Amino acid sequence: MNKLVSNSRTRVLLTCRTWFAHPQRGVLTAAPNTPKRRPASLNPPPPQRTESRRHRSGGAGMNVFDREMKRRQRKWAASLQGSQQFDYLRDEVMPSISPQVQGSPFLSFSRTFPLALDLGCGKSHIAQHLSKDVVERLVLADTSEDRLRSACEIPTQCVLADEEYLPFPENTFDLVLSSMSMHWINDLPGAFKQIQSVLKPDGVFIGAVVGGETLFELRCSLQLAETEREGGFSPHISPYTAVSDLGNLMGQAGFNMLTVDLDEIQVDYPSIFEVMTDLQGMGESNCAWNRKSVLHRDSMLAAAAIYQEMYGHPDGGVPATFHVLYMIGWKPHESQARPAKRGSATVSFSDLTQVGRTVTKETP
């Protein structure tokens, strides 16, 4: 029997063997006796360098990720037959994003947004959770034309756009949403500034990115295996943003009333090979410029043994941990609450020590 276990801020997707997507969207079902899934179509195209490694795609000289390679990876993943079977992680994150728009404790009130932007929309995972009562019109933006899909009741417009270069004028949107996309942006501080710019005053940005110690099991296993077999290792897992940095970056971009939270999701797989296969199917393969294009067979087999030995379950499966960082920021407006002026307090902190004594004396 499989279930979704909630324990504090950690959610674990439990299964005996492997996960596959049920025809009903968002339902995860376990197949205890099914063989290891290895679709024949999951053979990613060989990397084709159309841009020089010296190409500067981000502001301030930042150039960590090959954005063109990431676009091709997403396009290839979207073209897979049955690609919805790899959407389980995004489907798991969506319920944590959409209620925040529809009057969650994070926003604490109901509000209608005349115009919203879904940045890096993918297959419109967010749009499927929205209603006309919350968003009147929606703009879907993504780098891959194959991923731009409109399947919701809200009037939508699809725009082919890069998250690093927003083609929208200032003060355009009342709401900007982004889920599981911005962790591949080279210039994240610049992206936050652009989002803050296209928001109207008192507009809100709500986003979710993969960050923290995501896939630390896979990272550690590959590093140890390559070090032992080849005398050194290459970065096969892309760098991620730390949760402590998000608030600082958003504050520097001009956002007010910031909220940053972390959610840990753990998914069980039969082995390391299924972990890497599903990452390819999600379009989440590494695209850092300094990545190593070839992983030798001996190193791969050694990594599988290390993964199982260090992190494996008694039944033979292995976990993969994803840290999802949630963020909320508002564009400043005169109607928003502000801190009181310095020196305007009428009670000193030293007087607070007398409160308990006063209550005790008055109690009969």
Image (cartoon, rainbow, N blue to C red):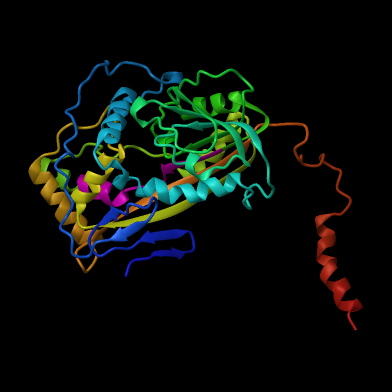
Q: Is residue 203 left or right of residue 156?
A: right
Q: Nearer the viewer, residue 229 or 120?
A: 120
Q: Which residues are magenta?
A: 206-223
Q: Is residue 84 left or right of residue 150?
A: left
Picture quadrant of residue 336: top right
Magenta run includes residue 215: yes
Q: Residue at 55% across / 19% down in the picture? A: 168
Residue 213 visible in the displayed image: no
Q: Position of residue 291 (x, y in %)?
A: 24, 32
Picture quadrant of residue 280: top left
Q: Position of residue 156 (x, y in %)?
A: 52, 30
Q: Nearer the viewer, residue 307 or 79?
A: 79
Q: Residue at 89% across / 51% down in the picture? A: 346
Q: Nearer the viewer, residue 201 or 287?
A: 201
Q: Quadrant of the C terminus?
A: bottom right
Q: How many marks?
A: 0
In this rendering, the answer to whether 358 lies above or below 11 is below
Question: In the current view of this chain or complex, which residue is farthest to the front?
Answer: 153
In this rendering, the answer to whether 257 lies above or below 165 is below
In this rendering, the answer to whether 196 lies above or below 106 is above
Q: Residue at 54% across / 35% down in the picture? A: 154
Q: Is residue 325 left or right of residue 360?
A: left
In this rendering, the answer to whether 130 lies above or below 287 is below
